[in-house]
């Protein structure tokens, strides 16, 4: 019996979702590095200290993506450390994206945004308040992924799968 037959589908699904988020993060990282080093972008001033700070954030994102990729590999192999790692990534994901969502919802209540929505600019096809609400909902959905990982990988059957895989007795899970 293959040990993939006894592995819950949620583990593979979580690994695939994390892989998709890694791909999105890699695209963002490539765009950030390109904007920082390959273009003359007016948003990135030619001040050495600013460029060092932005490059440091890019390096931090690269390290985070490497950690996530390592976790995906560990999840497919049912490594116990990968279960703890995805719960930590889920906690970070939940914290960061729920704060971003709450910040956008708070910013939407700003008198400036309310005024811009009351007197729309013809150059903006979508009201700014609607854009902020849409982004807040997207961030909230990503935060829910982190909550799912924290809850799912703490469930008893999932913990048991990783514990049995650690001891090498994966065939004991099926009757």
Image: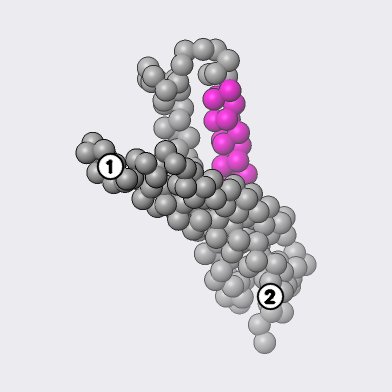
Residue 97 visible, this angle: no
Q: Which residue appears farthest toward the top when viewing the image?
A: 47
Dominant secondary structure, magenta: helix
Give whichever of 36, 50 is nearer the camera: 50
Real-space Cα distance between discs 2 and 1?
Answer: 53 Å
Residue that label 1 marks: 120
Give whichever of 163, 38 is nearer the camera: 38
Check if residue 61 falls in the magenta segment.
yes
Classify 10 Å Cα crowding around label 1: few (below 14), some (14-19), many (20 and above).
Answer: some
Q: Position of residue 68 (x, y in %)?
A: 59, 47
Give the residue displayed 48% in from the left and 35% down from the top.
Answer: 29
Among the 4 quarters of the image, the one containing residue 52: top right
Q: Position of residue 129 (x, y in %)?
A: 38, 47
On-image quarter of the C terminus: bottom right
Check if residue 87 falls in the magenta segment.
no
Q: Position of residue 104 (x, y in %)?
A: 49, 46
Residue that label 2 marks: 157
Please state the extent of the stretch shown in magenta in the rendering. Answer: 53-72
Does residue 71 appear to the left or right of 16 in the view shown? Answer: right
Q: Nearer the viewer, mark 2 or mark 1?
A: 1
SS at mark 2? helix
SS at mark 1? loop
In the rendered view, would you say 29 is above or below 170? above
In the rendered view, would you say 2 is above or below 91? below
Among the 4 quarters of the image, the one containing residue 62: top right
Q: Which residue appears farthest toward the right when viewing the image?
A: 167
């Amino acid at each position: 019996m293959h040990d993939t037959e006894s592995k819950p589908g949620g583990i593979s699904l979580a690994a695939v979702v994390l892989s998709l988020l890694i791909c999105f993060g890699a695209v963002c990282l490539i765009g950030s590095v390109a904007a920082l080093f390959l273009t003359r972008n007016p948003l990135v001033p030619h001040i050495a200290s600013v460029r060092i700070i932005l490059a440091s954030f890019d390096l931090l994102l690269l390290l985070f993506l490497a950690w996530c990729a390592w976790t995906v590999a560990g999840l497919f192999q049912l490594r116990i450390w990968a279960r703890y790692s995805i719960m930590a990534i889920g906690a970070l994901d939940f914290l960061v994206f729920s704060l971003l969502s709450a910040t956008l919802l708070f910013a939407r209540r700003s008198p400036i945004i309310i005024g811009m929505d009351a007197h729309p600019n013809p150059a903006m096809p979508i009201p700014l308040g609607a854009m902020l609400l849409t982004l807040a909902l997207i961030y909230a959905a990503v935060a829910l992924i982190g909550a799912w990982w924290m809850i799912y990988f703490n469930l008893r059957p999932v913990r048991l799968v990783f514990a049995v895989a650690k001891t090498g007795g994966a065939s004991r899970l099926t009757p």
